[in-house]
């Protein structure tokens, strides 16, 4: 099996770090892969149920066409879409993407599309024109607001739990222990190996390594195509339990099933999805959602034949207060 081999020096070990927050552009790009998987992991089932109908909107067809051209189902996507920047802030990350120098845009887009005919939108972007960048900004912002932002709390919790485990490894056993326990990796000093589409060796050369746990990275770790960029390794965040210190108080306040429903709605779900998640009937799930809605903890909107529920800011504040 082909592998990525990252070669460390003593300086690289000293400069290895873990990002504090999820990286919005890595999550966005990798989620585009999950939207097109025929058999996704169960982690993404509810997200796909929520997202796929929204991505089919005819009004935004050109946005989706641009994004799926930039991020094909298999193979490489341009490095400029996932900039080296502070994680956690979508607006700042998008600004960095839009500030990509024209020469780099042309180079990376040429490598992506090659000699084949592409849409005028893609051509304008490859030329680095203002119209092309504006269309990219519109497409990325639409996708983020439509299907990524509604799930961002779930992304943050999963990534945060994984980061906590890595920080514990680092504090208890140093970088060696951190690297030896990294998901989907094998640490054989001074080389970190992981499965990769092609055989590749990357000399870190004293630059260190930025580790980026990712909710939407589901299989093998990924890194930049350009070895001259600051080294990163994006790896699947583990499915670790999130502390729930306030479970008893939340159950006492709402009742056990209703507390489960409120927690389930920390990400948007249909009534059927809620029922499946808390193992109850659709009628019962609908009734509990109605009570939470009357209390101002949940909002419900009709989407075609389904009703979509999600927590309100007040419901989110309650969940955050009890660690739910």
Image (cartoon, rainbow, N blue to C red):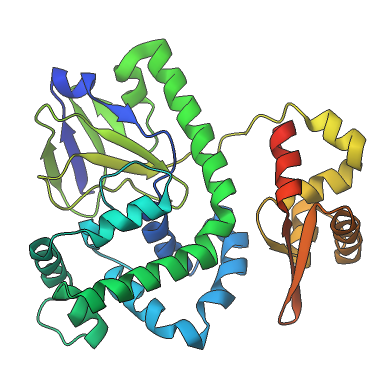
Is residue 128 visible in the rendered image? The answer is yes
| Image spot of residue 133 (x, y percent) | 26, 71
| Image spot of residue 126 (x, y percent) | 16, 74
Q: Spot the residue most to the front.
A: 130
When the figure is inspected, residue 63 is found, relative to residue 159, above or below; the finding is: below
241 left or right of 202 in image = right
Q: Quadrant of the C terminus?
A: top right
At a point 78% along the width and 49% down the height, the residue shown is: 262
Q: Nearer the viewer, residue 233 or 143?
A: 143
At a point 15% along the width and 45% down the height, the residue shown is: 229
At a point 32% along the width and 26% down the height, the residue shown is: 179
227 left or right of 33 in image = left
When the figure is inspected, residue 149 is found, relative to residue 202, above or below; the finding is: below
| Image spot of residue 29 (x, y percent) | 37, 60
At a point 62% along the width and 67% down the height, the residue shown is: 50
When the figure is inspected, residue 200 is found, relative to residue 12, above or below; the finding is: below
Image mark count = 0
């Amino acid at each position: 099996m082909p592998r990525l081999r990252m070669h460390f020096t003593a300086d690289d070990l000293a400069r290895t770090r873990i990002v504090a927050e999820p990286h919005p552009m890595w999550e966005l790009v990798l989620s585009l892969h999950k939207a097109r998987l025929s058999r996704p992991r169960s982690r993404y089932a509810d997200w796909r149920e929520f997202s796929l109908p929204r991505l089919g909107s005819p009004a935004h067809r050109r946005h989706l066409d641009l994004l799926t051209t930039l991020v094909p189902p298999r193979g490489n996507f341009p490095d400029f879409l996932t900039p080296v920047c502070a994680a956690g802030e979508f607006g700042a990350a998008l600004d960095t993407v839009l500030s990509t120098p024209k020469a780099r845009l042309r180079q990376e887009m040429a490598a992506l599309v090659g000699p084949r005919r592409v849409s005028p939108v893609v051509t304008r972007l490859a030329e680095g024109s203002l119209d092309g960048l504006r269309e990219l900004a519109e497409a990325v912002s639409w996708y983020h607001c439509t299907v990524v932002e509604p799930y961002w709390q779930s992304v943050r919790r999963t990534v945060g739990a994984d980061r906590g485990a890595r920080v514990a490894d680092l504090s208890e056993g140093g970088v060696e222990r951190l690297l030896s326990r990294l998901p989907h990796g094998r640490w054989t000093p001074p080389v970190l190996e992981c499965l990769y589409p092609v055989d590749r060796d990357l000399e870190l050369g004293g630059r260190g390594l930025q580790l980026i746990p990712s909710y939407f990275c589901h299989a093998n770790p990924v890194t930049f195509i350009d070895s001259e960029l600051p080294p990163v390794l994006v790896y699947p965040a583990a499915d670790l339990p999130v502390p729930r210190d306030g479970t008893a108080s939340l159950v006492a306040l709402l009742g056990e099933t209703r507390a489960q429903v409120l927690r389930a709605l920390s990400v948007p779900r249909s009534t059927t999805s809620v029922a499946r998640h808390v193992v109850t009937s659709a009628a019962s799930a609908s009734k509990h959602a109605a009570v939470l809605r009357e209390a101002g903890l949940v909002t419900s909107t009709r989407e075609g034949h389904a009703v979509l529920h999600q927590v309100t800011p007040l419901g989110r504040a309650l969940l955050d207060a009890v660690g739910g």
